[in-house]
Amino acid sequence: MRLPILESGNTSRHVTDVFSGYDHRLKIADGAFFDTKNLSSQHYPLMSTRPHRGTVKTLTNPGGIIGKDALCYVADGTLYVNDLATPVTGLSAGEKQLVSMGAYVVIFPDKVYYNTEDPTDYGNMEATYSSVGTITYAPCRVDGTVYENITKGESEPTPTNGALWIDTSDGGMVLRQYSSSFSGWTEITNVYTRITFSDHGNVPDLFKQYDGVTVSGAHYEDLNGQKVIYAVGGDSNEQDYIVLVGLYDAYTDEEGSITVSRTIPQMDYVCECQNRLWGCFYGNDGEKNLNEIYCSALGDFKNFRQYMGLSTDSWTASVGSDGQWTGAINYLGRPTFFKENRIHQVTISATGGHRIDETICRGVQKGSFRSLKVVGESLYYKSRDDVCTWQGGFPIGISAQLGDVKYDSAVAGTAFGLYYLSMRDGAGNYHLFTYDAARDMWYREDNLHALYFDTVDGELFCVDSDGHLLAMRGSVGTLEGSIDWIAETGTLAYETADRKYVSRFNLSLRMAAGDTLTIWIQYDSDGVWHDRGHVTFSGLGTVTVPIRPRRCDHLQIRLTGTGDLKLYAITRIVEIGSDM
């Protein structure tokens, strides 16, 4: 009997052995995934599950974290260092900005500090002293030593070596001292007044030499306003005093009332740069509208009002661009401040004449200041429309793979060259993404709502919305169990218009005993996922999964599973039919 000769079908083999991460656009490259869950680029070009996280503990009312030699965090109004409570307690509720400056942790908006190397060194950055009672004023030297035997008048006294004379001949007061070497009266140009209070030892606990303060209530009006304390003293045996610039008559006020205060300006965002604190503020401070950038005195985070005419002084400058500040960071040794449509960077001068540069471009999205992180030498942040990288020129968008979804409330961390980014979509759902900067590759991990990130000794710590303190790389804490993961492709087989079907899959993978993998297929975008096979496999090898043929125009594949997966390659066997 003669049988007809059957022609072989038009069969093709498609191998994907390089996996390029998350790509939420309508048309994506082979090897990319329209959606992922708990996958990472850790073993690129393989597709693999992310590292297991460790749960360190649960924090009550977490306020922020910062990485120093040990992890520091705020919980329930108390600062903890290396998991030990510090004397810094009673902090206000809400989120904090924790800034590192040397051994210190400075906490805003509470304006308190703590020395991580000296637990006895902590307190408020601001200080106020009010004295009621006898207050004396006397001309003095810069160290507070009161001048004795001063003669005051229009005509000079008997000239003896070292004699002091307050010359009032020109209507003002000039302090002069007679020198027998020059046979004349020499003007003392640097003149000071010592203000002595009735307290003993209180003032030196609040203020120190060269503090910039605001004085009010002084008997001599010119001693009121913003001043610098040139000396401070007092103890159990000596009455408290401060020394201010100015020459005034000795005077005793029996019922004086004077207030001395050291204040920190209200600031929206704060960073440390070149041994100074830098901050910005936009709005009304209670007296007037401000749009300013500030810095503290060199090496002194308590002094934002110290003006002595030196390069080490505090500094304040108004900014002309409109709009609220949205973030601040020290980038490449320059204080960098953001608005949604501006980047302002300060060029620090060794003479104190700092300059503010302005770039009109995409800035940080409002509410996403915690997205500012440096990976390698590049700065990353969430702008209003995308995620950007910036190196000092104009920002470059790097988030096209995230598709058309709009995100906000971004919080970021970094470890091992990865940029971790937790954001909220328009439906109110949170997503944790990782960006591999070296490979320009995104992965979506899960729905983690991160409040804070920071790194200590290579481990990235995170506090989530439930107060869990997590070690994202799993180096400490109680490791989580088996990980559920998903990898969903984009639309496949659209390259030809003919009808076609997938006959089988070959998966090259490594799985552990007890791990599972399921293959799902959706045909022609009908919204129905069909279970097309399960794999339970241990070790490294290739598994063939036969598929019952179903002709279609296009399809999507979804792989789901539990456990630790390393996928080396996916091979799909496709037979092309006619265009009917």
Image: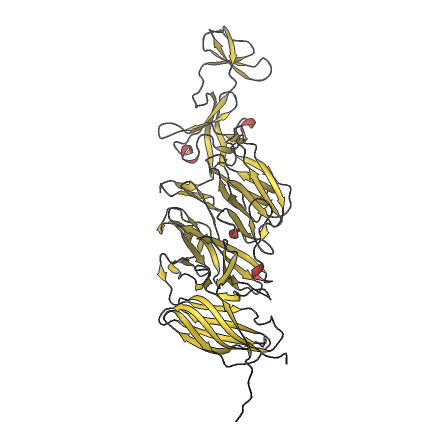
Q: Quadrant of residue 25?
A: bottom right
Can residue 288 be seen here? The reply is no
What is the x, y in percent for residue 377? 50, 46
Q: Position of residue 82 (x, y in %)?
A: 36, 50
**Residue at 53% across / 51% down in the picture?**
380
Report the front residue among 578 and 171: 578
Position of the C terminus by quadrant: bottom right
Which is nearer the eye, 60 or 455?
455
Q: What percent of the width, then of the height, locates residue 328?
A: 53, 46
| 111 is higher (above) or lower (below) than 483 | above
Residue with the most extreme front position: 2
For image coordinates 47% across by 44% down, the residue present is 111
Residue 1 vs residue 193, the one in the foreground: 1
User: Which colour assignment does the render follow?
Assistant: secondary structure
Residue 401 falls left or right of residue 559: right
**Residue 365, how many percent across, how many down?**
58, 53
| Residue 415, placed above or below residue 540 | above
Confirm whether residue 115 shows in the render.
yes
Query: Total number of numbered labels?
Result: 0
Residue occupying the point 38% across, 27% down = 238
Residue that sits furthest to the bottom in the current view: 1
